[in-house]
Each structure stands twice: as C-alpha cells, then as structure tokens.
Image (cartoon, grey):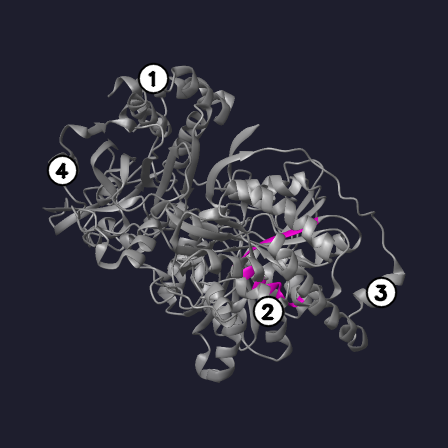
Amino acid sequence: MQNNSVTNILLSGVGGQGAILASNILAHVFVEAGYDVKKSEVHGMAQRGGDVTTHFRYGKKVYSPLIKYGEADFLLAFELLEALRYINYCKKSAKIVINEQKILPPAVNLGQAKYPEGIPETFKKFFKENVHVVKGQEIAFSLGNAQAANVVLVGAFSNFFPEIKKDMWMRALTDLLPKKIHELNIKAFSEGKKAL
Amino acid sequence: MKKVLQGNEAIARGAWEAGVTVAAAYPGTPSSEILAEMSQYKEIQAQWSPNEKVAVEVASGAAIAGARAMACMKHVGLNVASDPFMTLAYTGIKGGFVIVVADDPNVHSSQNEQDSRNWARFAKVPMLEPGDAAECKEFTKIAFDISEKFDTPVLLKGETRVSHSDSTVKLGERKKTAVPLGLDPKQSPKYVMVPANVRVRRKIIEERMRRLEAYADEFPYNKMEINDPAIGVITAGAAYMYTKEVFPNYSYLKLGMVWPLPKKLIADFYKKVKKVIIVEELDPFLETEIKALGYKVFHGKDLIPNMYELSPEIVAKALLGKKYKEPEIRVKPEDLPRRPPNMCPGCSHRALFYSLKKLGAFVFGDIGCYTLASAPPLQALHSCVCMGASIGQAYGAGKALGKEGLGQICAVIGDSTFLHGGITPLMDTVYNKGYSTSIILDNRTTGMTGLQEHAGTGYTLEGEPTNMVDYEQLVRALGVKHVQKVDPYDVKATMETIKEEMNRPEASVIITQNGPCMLHRREKRKFAYPFYGINMDNCRGCKVCLELGCPAISWVEKEGTTKDGKKRKGTVSINRLQCPGCGLCAQVCKFESIVPGKVGA
C-alpha cells in the first residue's frame, strides 16, 4: 500500500446482513486517517434478500467509485456463496476474510440447485494463507446478538490496517450506531479482532 | 469540514447551502434518499407528494412565489412529470427551481433504462451532471444560481453510481437567495400559457438557449485537462471517473453541464488534441451533437456500449480491444445459484399471491415489492409497466374479452402506487361500464423504496400526524359499488372473496387489511405464534409449502419414511431465526406437519 496508490476493498453479502454499515465504518475511519474515499452500492430491490456488494476504495485521490474487475486488494464477505461469487474480482495477492455463514438462495431452498461445497478450500487453492474464515455469527450470538456479526467481521478485518488506531475504529462505531448498542458492538469488534 | 456523504445526501446538503426552503418528491430508486435527508434541515419544508407531476407542480409554485425549490425523482418519474416540466420551460421561474432526475443504467431497480439527458434537449433547459458526491453538492448549488440568472428550470442528473456512491465532501454555509418572496399579478403574461403568451415565450426560450450556450463556455465545471495530446476524451459524470481511472494520461474535456454544449470550448479542445474519443453512458447524446457540429469523432458508440452501465473494465475493454487483459477466471459465476431479491418471510403479499395463483387469474401487476411475485415459484403476476397501469390494463383486457374474461382478470396495486396513479383508471373503469377487480395491497407504507410515508399512512415525511386517505370512501366516491376487505393471511376466505369479485360484471375493489410491511417500525401485525416448525413424523416431503417461496423454508434431501410408513425423498425445514410465525405454510400443508413452535422448545 504505497501512499499514491488506491486500495480496493470489495464487500459482499446478502441484503439485511449489515454490509452497508460495515462499509460506513470503513469510510469513517479512512476519512479520519486523511484518505480520499469512494464507495458504491446498489439499493432498492437488492435489499429484499438479494445479493449486495459494496465497492470501497481509498487512497490519495480516488476517481472511479467501482473497482476494476480483477483488481480487489481485499474481499470482505459476509456469506460463503457471496464470497465465491466474487472470487474473480480478487487480485492474485488479495487478502480474503469470509464469514462462515450459509444463507440458502431460493433455488437451493426449492431443491433445484445445490449450495456449493468447500468454499473456503476453493479460496485456499488460489489465495493460500491469505484466506481467513471467521465464525462471525457464532461469536456475535455468544455476545447475545447474532445481528452484530457484521461488526465482528469488521473487527477481524481491522487487523490488516495497523496504521488505523483503535480509537478511530471506536469513534466510527459510536458515531454511526445508536447509543444503546454501543457496548455490544464494541465487544463484537474486539472479539472479531481476536478471531484473526 | 470534510465528511463522507452519499451523492443523494450531498444533493440535499447542496440544496440546503443554496437556501432552498421547499422540496417535494415521490420516492424512486436511486433518488429516494434526497428528500428524507432534506427533511433533517429545519429551514426546508420537505414533503412526499403523491406522484412526480404533483411534486413538480408544488415545487414550481413555490419557485414562482420566490422561494428556492426542488423536486426529485427517478428517471421514469420525469415521464410522469413531463407535462408541467415541458411548459415550465416556457414560463420560467422566479426563485431558483431545480429538478433532480436520477437515471438507473443497467436497470438495478426500474422498469426501463432511459437517458434523461434527452429531456434537457427536448425541453430546451440546461442540465448539469455531477460525477461524485462532492460535485453533487457543488452542482446543486450552482444549478440554483443558473436557474435564477436565466429564469429557467434546471435539471440535475443523478444516476445509480453517483446518487448511491459515497465520497468526501467539504461542507459549506447556508446562503439565502436575493430573490424576494411574493406574487405579482402583473407577471401573468409570463405564467399564463395561452397561445398568444406562448408565442412570446417561445421566442424567449430560443434567446435563452443562446445565452446559455455562451455561459456553457464559461461554466467553471466544464474542465479541460491536457495531458498526452494524442488522445482527447470528451466525457461527463461517472463515465469520466471510469475513464480517468483506467487512462490517467489521456487528455480530457469533462463536461459538468451536458446541455447546452460549450461550442467554443469544444473547438478549443479539438485544436489541442489529435484524436477525440467520446465516452458516455447510454445514448450517443454528446456524440450526435458533436458530430452535428461538424467534428470527426475517432471513437464513440462504435466501441462504447449504448446500453447497461459502464465500469472501469468495460471502458478499458472497449478502448483497448485485444490489448485488454482479462483477469483470471477461477469460478464461473454463471454456474453459481443466483440470489434474486425475494419478498420477506411473513410478507402479506406472499399470502395474497398464493391465493391468486390458486385461482389461476391473469394478474395485471404494478410497481412495488409485489412485482417480485412474477418470479418462481409463485409466478402469479403477469404484467408490470408503470405506476397505475395495472388497473387500466385489466379494464382494457376485460373490454377486449367481454364475458369470456369474467373470472379471469384481476389488477393488483400497492397503497402508495394506487395513490400515485391508480385512481383515474379506476374512475375510467366505472365510468365506461367496464369490469375488473382491483386489489389494493395496503401494507401501510411505500415498501420497496425504503418505507416512505404517503397520503394513506396518516403521517407526513417529517413524522407529523396528518389526514389519512380512506380507500373505501375514496373508491366508493368514484362509483365503485362493490368494496370488500380481506385478511390476506386467511387464504381460504381471501380466495373466496377474490373469486366472487372476479366473476362480477362490474368494477370492484378489494382492500387488504392488517398486512403491514414486515419491515415497518410503527405498524406490526401480531401473529398467533412466534414461529413454526416441522413435525417430522408427518412431513411427506410433498413440497407444497415450497411453492410459497418463503426464504425461511428449505428442502432437505434425505430418504426416509413418515411415522405411518409413507416413503419420502426428503423433508422441509423452517429456519426459526427467519420465521416470523405468519402461519401461511401451515395453512397450505395437507398433512398437518407444520406446527406452531414454542419459545424455549
């Protein structure tokens, strides 16, 4: 990550998993760290349980809101199949964090299609030690709310950015979330950070 | 102060900084967030209008009274509002008046793909096109200045990748317009569009266009960047961002104002670069105009696609041709199960459409979450054109089929959509003695665009209690004699009611009751049980419940037998975290194998 280059983070998941909040947290910290930030997502119908992606880019000066196909430096996936769907977006050297959760798409629910097996293994074949699987939902559930899985994942992901100080992440959480869930999400972030 | 804002938030911020006091809109992806954001500013009176035409009328009335005013909509919204819009180009305004129109290239959530730049040329009004949130804010502010300076409505073009992209924005202060508030009856020749006045205004439009063309050459956001003079790119908005990303060394003429075009600046650019490429999303709008000015275009729509959205790789591939290096394909995405959007677990639309499917009706559909009922496994919605079309089309089909069509035709329309465009076709059905059954799917909100209030919810955008439209009284006043209310979750009773009305040779209306959107915060339906589960002794694996397409129900393939020895290929399973306990699946199960669950069980 040189100073003049742009870093590309692709976030993928299923509508309702909180991927947008996760990308808002990233935006908050990278702006505070002095970077130019752009992110793009599709709203509307995609919210109704469809697949959702956020293209997140930061650097000295960012033009395109979209990551060029095959140029993602990081993939942060909130669901296994939605990780696999974007495997080709990743650079050879990409670092990958996947939430170990399956949400069955309609065709699988109906028994008309099979949910792909061995997704982490497929990733490891191409990206070796750069693949990290996190039990986000399990960790969030143990803290009392499975909904906080997105913040667990952000906590795990934060390990890749040592230049971002802990208090910057904390400020993002407290600025973006309602007060009554601060404590839960701060715990979720810390547990996520330890999980990787 | 710097902040990351979404394009739509930045437009709202720009409007606030520009001193806007009145704003009106009908929600539509990707424009919906603008108004919600504007309602946060206490100086702005922001309101949801029943449709885009009304929004433009309200905002333009405010502008004629001297206020800075804004109307916001998606691309198809301007089709609805085109009638006042086209003539407001003649009357002009007084306080600044800006219409935001947000396109949806690649049709992420729309019924068609349109290039709204054509409206600017058609109506002879200026259009600005920002490329990111920072430009959204600045262009909104300058749009109001242009509007007042040239006495014209100004179009501000959004699009999915600008309206729904976030980037860093520098915040500024609010400034009031110098235009005084007030109405002047002496100005009426300017505002009364009768033929004698129209002919006068017609000439003024042409003079105004000439002055705007001269201004375009001075417009500070029509920017030239001369790098390598071998290739010069003329582009605008998001297309500039993609092209600059992949070809940083080319020279650029980036247009912030896409209509009218800066003729001198274009001439100057042609002198400075050897070859000109035009990169624009959708129609060859700039290309056609620049070619008409007599310039040679080295590449344009011969390489750049004229449909769907652009992206860095699409621009790179188009311009590099064989030199473009495809990234490594590790998994073929087309081999993976798709994940289309679906109605939420427990949604009242699912129950209603299951009934319609069982009745075998041809269902004329409309715009809303319920359009998702066209997808498998329900496949119970058979047309979708525009807001309000379901009722008019169902009536027209009945006209064509006569008695043969009785019992087969039905129209469905959401509550917000009915108020948007469904009232007049229903009046037509009664007036012209047609028959058809219109079902108003009242989920108490504008669901698909993110739960906005409307005239039927009893609350304003700002959350104040207000009048609530009574659908039954309204349709009775139109002349509909047969109005029934159904609980959509009661499949048997709902089917009986719909069947009865569909066979009636008159107009009838069915209104769904107690089926609020599952995402609604204020209104919730209380279900009898918290969730349902499967009685494995009984489940025969018949898959009838799977026909509902509920995301909480899934198929588990595993051969076995029921308790009474019936062979089965598998069973279903209900995800209790997703199941809200609506009980629809229990109603359709023939073997009593879907049973209420208990907390703690």
In magenta, the rendered stretch is: B69-83
Give the amino acid at mark 4: Phe
Q: Disc 1, disc 3: CB below 8 Å?
A: no
Q: CA distance from mark 2 to mark 1?
A: 57 Å
Residue designated by label 2? B122
Residue designated by label 1? A190
What residue do we see at 61% from left, 46% from top? Answer: B140
Query: Circle 3 sits in a helix, a strand or a loop, which is it?
Result: helix
Do we see residue B363 in this rendering? yes
Q: CA distance from mark 3 to mark 2?
A: 25 Å
Q: CA distance from mark 4 to mark 1?
A: 29 Å
Give the amino acid at mark 3: Ser
Marks 4 and 1, the one that precedes in the sequence? 4
Q: Chain of mark 3?
A: B
Do we see residue A50 in this rendering? no
Residue B429 at x, y percent in the picture: 59, 75
Residue B475 at x, y percent in the picture: 64, 64
Query: Circle 4 sits in a helix, a strand or a loop, which is it?
Result: helix
Q: Chain of mark 4?
A: A
Residue designated by label 3? B188
* The N terminus of chain B sits in image quarter: top right
Query: Circle 2 sits in a helix, a strand or a loop, which is it?
Result: helix
Q: Which mark is residue A126?
A: 4
Q: Are marks 4 and 1 on the same chain?
A: yes
Give the amino acid at mark 1: Ser
Q: Residue furthest front?
A: B271
Marks 3 and 2, the one that precedes in the sequence? 2
